[in-house]
Image (tube, grey):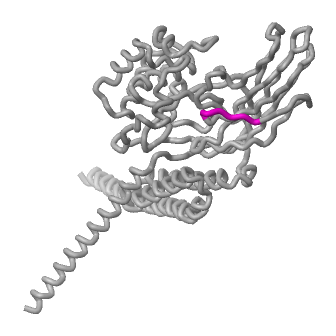
Amino acid sequence: MRGKSQKVILALMLIFAIISASLVMSVASFTFKNQKSLLKFKLRNPTGYNLTHVITITNLGVFPIHKAVLKVPLIGNSTPFHFSFIEKIERNMNYGFIKMDSDPYLNHYVVWEIGEIEPKKQVTLKIIYTLVSFHVYFQINAGNIEKYDKSSEIYQLYTQPEDYIESNDPEIIRVAQEIVGNETNPYLKAMGIAVFIEDNIAYEMQDQERGAKWALTNRKGDCSEYSYLFTALCRAVGIPARIQAGFSFHTDDEIMDQGHMWAEYYLENYGWIPVDLTWSQINQLDNLHFSSLQTFPPDYPYDNCYFYYSNLKIEASFQQKIGIKRIEPEYIQNFTMAYQTYLAVSRIQNAEFFLSLAKFLGANVFFISDCQRIEQMIDENDLNIQFALENNDSQSLLLTKSQIENLEVAAKQLFLKELMLTLTLIVIIAIIISVLLKRGRKEIQKSEKLESNETIFP
């Protein structure tokens, strides 16, 4: 009897342990999935840059230019895409005055009211920025998207037609409805529109702004037409969308003389999502895109600068150069939020690197739970960064610093553990092969000896 009761108790304890472990795993799995559903974007490839924007205007005529004004949109502090800090604004002529301006679309400008420019004279404005930027990857779950509030300012403003975005044109409406069909999810609608443009619009540089209707009719265009058409097709089926203009670079040490344009569409519960079809970046944007305009005011042209003056018959030359150069992290230490985000993302990326090395060596076979734990820690820290940026809270980034350091250490330890296991297995296999080869050689020698004996004594 006593033996039976002990077996029953042991069996109950085993069942209880299994149930407890299952509950813990279920809770952990639920927490992990819940964190995944809250994660809207991930930041990677943090980089610091100096960007210099130089605008040069020359009076080519024989009479003075009067009431000259130069208006330049500023690169915005566009988290989570980039942090922007104006280091210096310089001018070569000390007359007129500079002021700051803004518009209802939250664009900000430097306005230089130059006044008079003498014949053959040249004026130059230079704006120098320090930038901290990231490659942002949006993590969109179609099931988490809420319905639009059609009475909201965003919906009302960004579903209306405007110059170059003819979302009320019958052909644009017809094509947009044909693309989306019976789909009701705005995210899937936008993806269908993006695929349509990639498949049907050929890239070809244009010497002027053409607009969405022209691009659809002629099935070609450059970054402007791609962006206008995507925005117009989205608006035609009730998805808020807008233009972004600014600068984009191919390398981190480059000088160019013109800007770039891309688009964004809006999802409830996610916000504005970037789409650059020229560069095939959908729901993501690299760390070399810098926005200075989001939507254009009615009185402002589609450009990175605006120069105007009263006597327009006088010929003036307008040139701009935009240069970018990478800088080391120590140059951004004074910008607390940007620097803390830079460090946090760098360490997460280091952890991912060591995790990928460990998996390459087989950790996802031998240390499954460790891999899952580190992946969960990565998502947790990405989520902490997201919350900090959404709330402009640098203090919370400092509080998560130790968690991110623990993540980096855990990933390195997993890599080292898997490396040791791999090396041990290699040594064991090498020993086994050596033993087998040695045994094989002995068998061969034995066989040869027998054959030799048989030859001597037939």
Q: Residue 340: x percent and y percent?
A: 64, 55
Quadrant of residue 95 in the image?
A: top right
Q: Residue 122: x percent and y percent?
A: 88, 20
Q: Residue 19: x percent and y percent?
A: 23, 70
Image quadrant where one finds the N terminus: bottom left
Residue 156 included in the magenta stretch of the image = no
Residue ID at (55%, 36%): 285
From the viewer's perspective, is residue 347 above or below residue 273? below
From the viewer's perspective, is residue 99 above or below residue 198? below
Residue 104 included in the magenta stretch of the image = yes
Asked if residue 251 can be seen in this view, the reply is yes
Asked if residue 350 can be seen in this view, the reply is no
> Which residues, given as a range, are shown in magenta?
100-105
Q: Residue 420: x percent and y percent?
A: 48, 62
Q: Is residue 379 left or right of residue 316?
A: left
Q: Is residue 75 left or right of residue 242?
A: right
The answer to which of 308 and 430 lies nearer the viewer is 308
From the viewer's perspective, is residue 7 above or below residue 248? below
